[in-house]
Amino acid sequence: MRRMLLSGALVVSLSGCGVAARPSDVSTQATSPAPSSGTVVPTSATPTPAKAALTIPEAGQAMQKWVGRYNATLKKHEWWRSNARLDALFIEGALHEGVLERSQWGSERKTRHKPINPVGTPTVFVPRPERQPSSGDWFIAQATYQDAKGRARPHVLAFFRSPGQPFRLAVATPIHWGERMPKPLLDADGYVTDMDDSMAGAVAEEYENFWNGERKKEGDSGYRLAANSYSRKAFPAVNKGAYVGFAGTGSIFGFRTADGGSFFLFALLNDDKKAINNVLSEALLVPKDSNTIRELGANWFS
């Protein structure tokens, strides 16, 4: 299921805020309390009566509609300057990336957001309607489209909608070359099986500690990054640049895999009340009976 960490500063909306020259100038609203130790907030398993159940075909259609709105927005002149346009498409980590897009504006500017034109039909992973949180609906999508360098590549994305609102993108990342999305454990109706809440919180805590340089805490969560992780290779390089420590994560999306493992998708975020300098989106797998975290995909946006 989708889980929300107390340690995350989750940006909900930019509408009504002034256009900012720098990310730190953006006055945003946060839905989470002050950062803490990565406690997982259980979400209600009972949908509100007024909320229509999200079916698997509807999730696929929602993905297509979002892609259409996204591509149309990218054709607008300096689309990144509009809070309303960012709000209409993004939340959480994806919204932080939109804020960073605006902060990089200049005479030599090249947008890092590219049109999305999926090759084939995207695959969607949806929890049972009664397992959706009362605050809305979510689903994960797997789609192949061009990455920032123009190469066709599998990507994994997570979408969320509040009651009565369209779906918005929360987090997305390409899958690393040589890796692939795991097969989910599905029930008889084709819905995914809930992830382990305690494992989700521990994995997020381990990543936050690693990227914040807390090497003495490595492994305290009960899990460790694999030796060949993208993060282990990337941290020494990016830490020399405009790196700012992460305050936590956005919502954690995930499911149990068919072979007994667990898949997680989330974004590491800065404290938006101070400055937004970087976003790290992660697609992770913890194999069955293992304490090693495999990175299936990652995307650094700064």
Image (cartoon, helix red, strand yellow):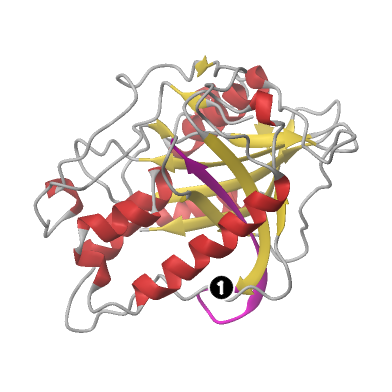
In percent of the image, x 52 and y 30: which residue is there?
Answer: 51
Residue 47: x, y in percent? 57, 22
In percent of the image, x 64 and y 50: which residue is there?
Answer: 59
The magenta region covers 146-162
Q: Main secondary structure of the magenta part?
A: strand
Residue 58: x, y in percent? 64, 50
In percent of the image, x 39 and y 56: which residue is there?
Answer: 89
Label 1 Cα neighbours within 10 Å, binned few <14 / some 14-19 / many ≥20: some
Residue 127: x, y in percent? 70, 34
**235 on left or right of 226:** left
Name the quadrant of the C terminus.
bottom left
**42 on left or right of 284:** left
The answer to if 247 sits in the magenta stretch is no
**Dot 1: element:** loop
Judging depth in this view, the residue of 222 and 116 nearest the camera is 116
In percent of the image, x 63 and y 73: which residue is there?
Answer: 118
Residue type pointed to by label 1: Asp
Judging depth in this view, the residue of 69 and 149 nearest the camera is 69
**169 on left or right of 230:** left
Name the quadrant of the N terminus.
top right
Q: Is 104 rendered above or below residue 259?
A: below
Q: Which residue lies furthest to the front in this view?
A: 50
Instruction: Give the labeled residue for mark 1.
Output: 147
Residue 232: x, y in percent? 58, 48
Can residue 240 be seen in this snapshot? no
Q: Is 265 rendered above or below residue 36?
A: below
**260 on left or right of 198:** right
Can residue 186 be seen in this snapshot? yes
Quadrant of res 197? top right
